[in-house]
């Protein structure tokens, strides 16, 4: 049980006792035919007694009243829709049977959609785990699972969903850093599946009090806030340059090692330690330099 559910009466959906609308439609037709027969064939003559006139009036009023009651009780349920039935404020159940239904007209019917709803949240500015201001937004697919809770346990379940989505997004966003340059933590930028799963669990926990089930949740926008975006972009560029340089140096060292090994194996040239060091230095400059190198041709003796 969540903290929101503690100390409150929890409603639970149960089936309502309504009638088949098509059968009641036949009853309505029968009442219309009866009223027509009363009016057309049972009108008392001018010399009829008082009792006969009273009986005619009561029959006519009863037929009209029956027509009014029956015709006012019809309502229709579409697929993935429910009607919450109440009687003078008391919950009498929820009707989910599709088609034409009928209930006593003094019983109130409030229709609730049980279809999937899709919400794209507004961009929210929060602080990540390291205190960096970021902008974040998400997309949520939700539906009403318990119509009684959605109707009676929260004031406005749609507004409740919107507010809890923002609150859940803030909670999950503050648990993780935007990025981890050491690669040791789950981050908002790289831990997509983990973050989406946490957001889904957080929202389901928050919305259970309203009878709402979240089927899907995921981040759709993630960026540093404008006040630090420029500085963080420079940091990301610096990290990218360092990573690229590291890869270039490792590759160059491997190429130099292969070149020296090949020269030695094929007995092309025998280099002492000093000239081997000079050759390594020159090759690394050529392979790691950003600008094009211009070789110097030695026309004299190597030694």
Image (tube, grey):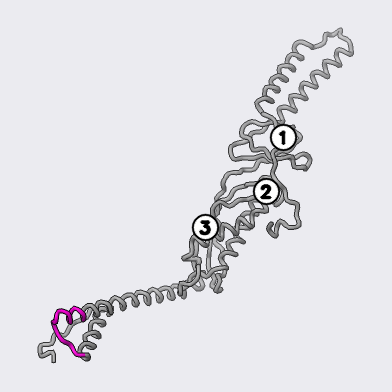
CA distance for labels 2 and 1: 20 Å
Q: Is residue 155 visible?
A: yes
Residue drawn at x 58%, y 62% is: 169
Q: Earlier in the sequence, mark 2 or mark 1?
A: 1
Percent position of residue 286, x then y: 24, 80
Q: In front here: 172 or 294?
A: 172
Foreground label between 1 and 3? 1
Q: Are marks 2 and 1 in contact (CB under 8 Å)?
A: no
CA neighbours of label 1 inside 10 A, class few (<14), some (14 to 19), many (20+)? few
| Callout count | 3
Q: Secondary structure at mark 3?
A: strand
CA distance for labels 1 and 3: 40 Å
Q: Residue furthest left?
A: 300
* Residue assigned mark 2: 150
* Residue assigned mark 1: 17
Horizontal side, residue 114 vs residue 65: left or right: left
CA distance for labels 3 and 2: 24 Å
Q: Which residues are magenta?
A: 260-272
Q: Secondary structure at mark 1?
A: loop
* Residue assigned mark 3: 218
């Amino acid at each position: 049980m969540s903290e929101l559910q503690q100390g409150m009466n929890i409603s639970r959906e149960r089936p309502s006792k309504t009638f088949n609308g098509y059968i009641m439609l036949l009853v309505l037709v029968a009442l219309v035919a009866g009223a027509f027969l009363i009016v057309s064939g049972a009108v008392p003559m001018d010399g009829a007694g008082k009792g006969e006139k009273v009986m005619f009036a009561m029959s006519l009023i009863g037929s009209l009243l029956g027509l009014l009651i029956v015709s006012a009780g019809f309502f229709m349920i579409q697929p993935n829709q429910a009607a919450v039935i109440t009687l003078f404020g008391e919950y009498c159940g929820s009707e989910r049977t599709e088609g034409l239904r009928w209930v006593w007209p003094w019983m109130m019917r409030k229709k609730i959609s049980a279809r999937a709803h899709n919400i794209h949240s507004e961009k929210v500015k929060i602080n990540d785990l390291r205190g960096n201001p970021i902008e974040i937004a998400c997309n949520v697919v939700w539906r009403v699972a318990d119509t009684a809770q959605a109707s009676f346990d929260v004031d406005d379940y749609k507004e409740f969903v919107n507010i809890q989505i923002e609150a859940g997004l803030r909670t999950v966003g503050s648990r993780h850093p935007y990025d981890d340059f050491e690669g040791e933590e789950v981050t908002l930028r790289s831990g997509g599946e983990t973050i989406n799963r946490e957001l889904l669990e957080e929202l389901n926990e928050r919305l259970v009090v309203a009878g709402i089930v979240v089927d899907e949740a995921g981040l759709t926008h993630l960026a540093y806030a404008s006040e630090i975006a420029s500085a963080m972009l420079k940091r990301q560029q610096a990290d990218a340059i360092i990573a690229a340089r590291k890869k270039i140096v490792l590759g160059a060292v491997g190429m130099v090692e292969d070149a020296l090994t090949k020269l030695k194996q094929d007995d092309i040239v025998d280099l002492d330690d000093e000239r081997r060091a000079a050759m390594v230095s020159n090759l690394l400059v050529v392979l790691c330099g950003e600008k094009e190198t211009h070789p110097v041709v030695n026309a004299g003796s190597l030694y």
